[in-house]
Amino acid sequence: MKSVRNVLLLAVGLLASASSAFAQSPSTYPTKQVTIVNPFTAGSVSDLLARILAEKLGALWKQNVIVENKPGIAGTIGAAKSANDGYTLISTSNGHTIIAALNQGLTIDPVKDFTGITLIGSVPVVLIVTPELPVKSLKELIALAKEKPGTLNFTSAGPASSNYLAGELFKQTAKIDIVHVPFRGTPEQLTSIMRGDSQMSLAFMGNALPFIQSGKVRALAIATKTRNPALPDVPTFAEAGMPEYEYDSWFGFMAPAGVPAPIVKKINEDIASVLKLPDVQERWKTVGALAVTNTPEQFNAIIRADTERYGQLLKAAGITPK
């Protein structure tokens, strides 16, 4: 009787394993709603890109794909601690790579607790200033900042945002003393500059473009190798006299660590196919983004390298976890 019972238990175990394997099979994924966590506010670049992809992936997968805005570190922590079954993803920026350097006692590891799926885009940043600031060029701005150390400020969409990194890198590269002023999101920081409450930002081109064109903010330089056709009169940092300033603001999709590799591969391939669609390419342009994809392995390598690079940058700036 004992041997029969053991055989039955083994059979039940094998059936359970087979059922689990089937549930995780890339040929059947997804079989229910997929949630994309976005740790930034509605209207941010990360949010806009995620919503476009959610719409297209939902149609492709014939399942609901929703974007859930959870601004701040809480959103990232929640995503990391979600079930590693592929039904919770996170759409984030390269600001993700500095959360450990900024937050003391962090309960997650931004590298080890996530697996990269793919890059989805790269968005150039443009240095903008309030029109009230008496500068017309990058050199004049740097000269003013050196003349009045600690009095000018730069805004960002929060301490873990991509444009915070861009601003801190600019501060160190130019060797100027400017103060960081974080805001809850992108719309708030741009409004502050338009009102003259803040002086400058390394803003995403897509967000800043209409305000540059309307004269509500002034653009001094763009962090690209060549001028952007949408801003033909705005010089690159190299043309403006700072060739050493280089910054690539990327956006990408990740999943909690431990999601089966076949599922990660399927999501990667499906996102890549969506990004090739002409209407998606056009919608990316409206945000000022360039569609970019890579393999999970390549993306994981970028995450590790940027975590090391920007961690050293913040350490050099005297910034410690709080």
Image: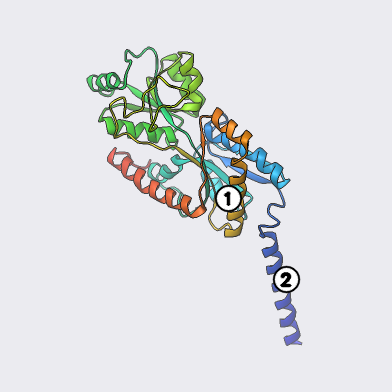
The x, y position of residue 282, in whole percent, is 59, 31
Residue identifier under label 2 = 15
Q: Residue at x 43, y 48 (%)?
A: 302
Q: How is the image coloured?
A: rainbow
* Camera sees residue 108: no
**What's the residue type where badge 1 is placed?**
Asn
Upstream in the sequence, badge 1 or badge 2?
A: 2
Q: Local crowd at mark 1 within 10 Å, few (<14), some, or many (≥20)?
A: many
Residue 282 in view of the camera: yes
Work out whether 232 lies above or below 132.
Answer: below
- For mark 2, give the secondary structure: helix
User: Which SS class for mark 1?
Assistant: helix
Q: What x and y, as percent, mark residue 54?
A: 64, 40
Mark 1 or 2, which is nearer the eye?
1
Residue 170, percent from left and from top:
32, 31
In the rendering, at what x and y percent does residue 312 appear?
31, 45
- In the figure, is residue 253 to the left or right of 201? right
The residues tagged by marks 1 and 2 sit, at their Cα atoms, a distance apart of: 29 Å
Instruction: Name the residue type under label 2.
Output: Leu
Is residue 62 rendered to the left or right of residue 100? right
Are dots 1 and 2 in contact, CB under 8 Å?
no
> Which residue, given by chain and number where applicable, does mark 1 sit on?
268
Residue extending furthest left? Answer: 147
Q: Nearer the viewer, residue 281 or 297?
A: 281
State the residue in front, 297 or 102: 297
Q: Total of numbered circles in the picture?
A: 2
Quadrant location of the N terminus in the rendered image: bottom right
Relative height, residue 68 to residue 270 (above, below):
above
Looking at the image, which is closer to me, 66 or 61?
61
